[in-house]
Image (spheres, helix red, strand yellow):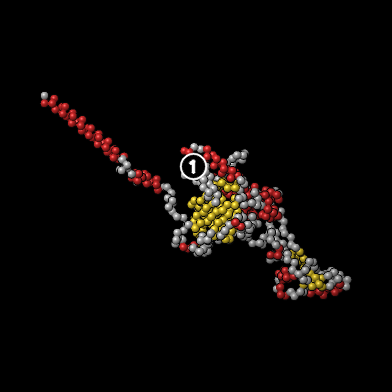
Amino acid sequence: MAWALKLPLTDEVIESGLVQDFDASLSGIGQELGAGAYSMSDVLALPIFKQEESNLPPDTDNKILPFQYVLCAATSPAVKLHDETLTYLNQGQSYEIIMLDNRNLGELPEITGKMVKSIIRVVFHDRRLQYTEHQQLEGWRWNRPGDRILDLDIPMSVGIIDPRANPTQLNTVEFLWEPSKRTSVFIQVHCISTEFTMRKHGGEKGVPFRVQIDTFKENESGEYTEHLHSASCQVKVFKPKGADRKQKTDREKMEKRAPQEKEKYQPSYDTTILTECSPWPEITYVNNSPSPAFNSTQNSFPVAEGNGSPSHQPEPVVQVADNLLPTATPQDAQQWLLRNRFSPFCRLFTNFSGADLLKLTREDVIQICGPADGIRLFNALKGRVVRPRLTIYVCQESQQAREQQPKHENGDAAANTFFVYHAIYLEDLTAAELTEKIALLFNISPRQINQIFKQGPTGIHVLVSDEVRSCAFLCC
């Protein structure tokens, strides 16, 4: 009976203990999930999240950048939140970029009161097109000979100094500016986004570009090679008035969306702020050689080539460029292009043999290389040279020839007299030029030549002045 009396008591104790334990467990779970005990920072402190966090880019929201560039063109309203802004531009229209000095007091004192150099370029946004940028730009040059992708509108720009554009880099311009002074530069983009699409059947979406600005300061040698800041933005370029129509279409589409859908998109801003980015990797523009002046032709080779003027040659003969033979291999053709100052087009004619180049017509070459370089290349391919304005022939008489001269004038033939004439090519048509070239021909000093006479048909001597136009001369 004692066991029968204790069993119910034991069951109650066990049941009561289980209930308390279960309540305590629920209470503990509640406390762990409570707002006061739960902390996201504790979860992010776990090793797995620390490892992922180290791969994320550093937070630059609170970082003050030294410069800020503002493109005065509205952003598209059809861009989702957290996506990069997109700006529509019209082909050939001038757009202002405001260059702002964003430094704190005492920051970067080495550029205070000094110039910095900024390079603006239009590049591809898609990585696939970036890998084939050279081929894409050469194809554009082929279709648009003589045109540039990016230009500066200098009359409208303010505060820029020494603007320059390299003829071999169609998508790049550069200039100097002082950060402490008001500076704004106006750019013009002449290519449109649909020119670089793979298929062109109408209605294709154009490829996006990037407008990127890289700024450099002077180093100890006075060269602008030390990188300061880079920023860029995404743009699309349309035919004239096309950007305005596209902006209006995007705005109308957004107005038709439900309020909940509109919250997923960015608002349209009147201006576009270029965001910080890495400097452009192919910084071949940072070099020691001087850049050509804006809209000028770059020429870093000596003039004494086959197409040069004969007056610049040490010998009084016309120097003809080595002719390209039809049997020349593509490697020989490349060397010929380099020797004749056509290095910017070597990549374009990589697989061209001598026969391929010689088959090109004048119109073909001009379309490929542009009017200036095209005419020069065509003349070089055909072996053409610039003719001098005047060619004269001179000889130096020996003492024997002078003694026989009276007999010759009296009608006695001087059969044993042999004269050798040398050609002299004149460009300026002046007596001073003629004196120098005669002295160079006969290896004497120009001071040894007192006067130059023209011998007439009856033997008279006419003093030569700057009005010389004939070609029979006698030096004494």
Name the residue furthest left. Answer: 2
Would residue 316 be found to the left or right of residue 187 on screen?
Answer: right
Q: Quadrant of the C terminus?
A: bottom right
Looking at this view, is 249 or 28 the one in front?
A: 249
Amino acid type at circle 1 is Tyr
Could you tell me if residue 467 is visible in this image?
yes
What residue sits 58% from the left and 52% below the top?
95
Residue that label 1 marks: 265
Q: Residues within 10 Å of mark 1 (few under 14, many from 20)?
A: some
Helix, strand or loop status at disc 1: loop
Q: Position of residue 353 (x, y in %)?
A: 65, 49
Name the residue furthest right. Answer: 411
What residue sits 14% from the left and 27% below the top?
6
Looking at this view, is 303 or 64 the one in front?
A: 64
Looking at this view, is 109 or 165 the one in front?
A: 109
Q: Position of residue 290 (x, y in %)?
A: 58, 61
Would residue 346 be found to the left or right of residue 282 on screen?
Answer: right
Would residue 386 be found to the left or right of residue 38 on screen?
Answer: right
Q: Position of residue 360 (x, y in %)?
A: 69, 49
What residue sits 58% from the left and 60% below the top?
162
Looking at this view, is 72 or 258 the one in front?
A: 258
Would residue 335 be found to the left or right of residue 397 on screen?
Answer: left
Q: Position of residue 21 (x, y in %)?
A: 23, 35
